[in-house]
Image (cartoon, rainbow, N blue to C red):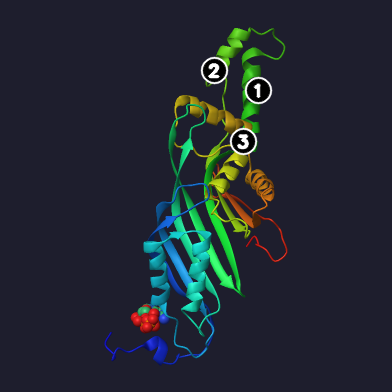
């Protein structure tokens, strides 16, 4: 490197002095191998945020290239594990001696998983948005993960109103006290005059963030997806034959839910898992009745833990 190159970060003074909470880069484009719990290591296309704090009020700035190159080294020579995440944060701090004592890194990527259909046994891909966050402060590493899981929610109120219309149509067709011909009723139930109304349902997304306990050594991406889908029962499907679609209709009918119901189901399910020190759940029902969304937010509720907002 020519000796005459100016080194602004090291040699010049800040225009205004002051410490900064985070300085670094966002939207860094990085292909990276991810080693998730119980899964083969695989490449994902990540966007990364990398930050350190700036504790020297008079220093011009941090050394962005050092953070970038450490991340690049992980991308080209390693894979993302809980261990390498810890190492990366330690390296961020070591590369900023006397400038920083806190570090933060966030990886955001789509994680593709094979998901089996409900009845036919066919399989297809689903891409789950995943965020992995690590931060180092006061000598402690904290690891967090967020997974977004899409599902279907059918409105219980709309279902009750639809049932009432079906009862009314039944009375109009067959009267209140007549002896019924079972064959005729069965046939009528198979027509749109029989099932005269259907409840509205909507594609919904559960955003689930967890803080991982130290003993959780692998990123539990599949565990979180499975927990959410098993709790809600109506995950969005990949490969669908007619028998799968019919089972999906049955599951929706048997798992009617407001956003409050979905939030409570998830809270109960996540409370059973000891490896999650804390959690934050945001349930979004992208309504088809309204142009606005129905939302519920909940946390584990521990002192000093996640807050709803
Ligand atoms: N600190 C800082 N650097 C920036 C910013 N925007 C662009 N950069 C550039 O990031 C580049 C890398 O900075 P450094 O890491 O200090 O690079 P360097 O001096 O070659 O590397 P070292 O010798 O390791 O300090 C520099 O060319 C900066 O101009 C910014 O907002 N803040």
Query: As displayed, is residue 241 above or below residue 295?
Result: above
Q: Quadrant of residue 64?
A: bottom left
The vertical placement of 23 against 178, above or below, is: below
The CA distance from mark 3 to mark 2 is: 20 Å
Residue 249 vs 89, above or below: the answer is above
Label whose residue precedes the other's in the sequence (3 or 2): 3
Q: Quadrant of the C terminus?
A: bottom right
User: Quadrant location of the N terminus?
Assistant: bottom left
Residue at 42%, 71% (x, y): give it: 70
Q: Secondary structure at mark 3?
A: helix
Residue visible at 52% across and 31% down? Answer: 118
In the picture, measured across the screen, residue 3 lies left or right of residue 273, that is left
The secondary element bearing badge 1 is classed as helix
User: Between marks 2 and 1, how big is the CA–CA gap?
Assistant: 14 Å
Q: Label 3: how many residues lie within 10 Å, few (<14), some (14-19) or many (20+)?
A: some
Q: Mark 2 vs mark 1: which is more N-terminal?
A: 1
Find disc 2 in the rendering and name its residue. Answer: 190
Residue 167's disc is 1
**Helix or strand or loop: what does disc 2 sit on?**
loop
Residue that numbered label 3 is attached to: 158
Q: Position of residue 110 (x, y in %)?
A: 44, 52
* Marks 2 and 1 close (CB-CB < 8 Å): no
Ligand 1: quadrant of the figure: bottom left
């Amino acid at each position: 490197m020519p000796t005459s190159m100016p080194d602004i970060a090291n040699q010049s003074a800040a225009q205004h002095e002051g410490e900064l909470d985070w300085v670094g880069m966002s939207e860094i484009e990085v292909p990276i191998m991810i080693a998730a719990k119980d899964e083969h290591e695989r490449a994902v296309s990540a966007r990364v945020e990398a930050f350190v704090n700036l504790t020297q009020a008079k220093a011009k700035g941090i050394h962005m290239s050092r953070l970038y190159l450490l991340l690049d080294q992980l991308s080209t020579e390693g894979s993302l594990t809980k261990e390498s995440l810890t190492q990366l944060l330690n390296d961020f701090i070591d590369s900023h001696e006397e400038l920083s004592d806190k570090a933060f890194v966030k990886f955001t990527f789509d994680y593709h998983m094979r998901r089996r259909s409900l009845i036919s046994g066919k399989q297809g891909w689903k891409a789950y948005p995943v965020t992995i966050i690590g931060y180092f402060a006061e000598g402690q590493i904290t690891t967090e993960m967020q997974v977004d899981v899409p599902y279907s929610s059918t409105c219980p109120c709309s279902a009750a109103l639809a049932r009432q219309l079906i009862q009314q149509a039944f009375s109009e067709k067959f009267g209140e006290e007549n002896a019924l011909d079972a064959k005729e009723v069965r046939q009528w139930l198979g027509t749109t005059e029989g099932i005269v109304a259907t409840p509205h349902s909507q594609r919904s997304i559960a955003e689930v963030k967890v803080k991982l306990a130290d003993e959780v050594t692998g990123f539990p991406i599949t565990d979180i997806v499975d927990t959410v889908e098993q709790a809600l029962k109506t995950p969005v499907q990949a490969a669908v034959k007619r028998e799968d679609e019919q089972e999906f209709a049955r599951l929706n009918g048997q798992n009617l839910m407001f956003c409050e119901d979905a939030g409570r189901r998830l809270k109960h399910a996540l409370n059973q898992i000891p490896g999650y020190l804390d959690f934050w759940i945001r349930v979004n029902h992208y309504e088809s009745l309204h142009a606005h969304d129905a939302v519920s937010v909940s946390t584990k509720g521990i002192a000093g833990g996640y807050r709803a907002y």
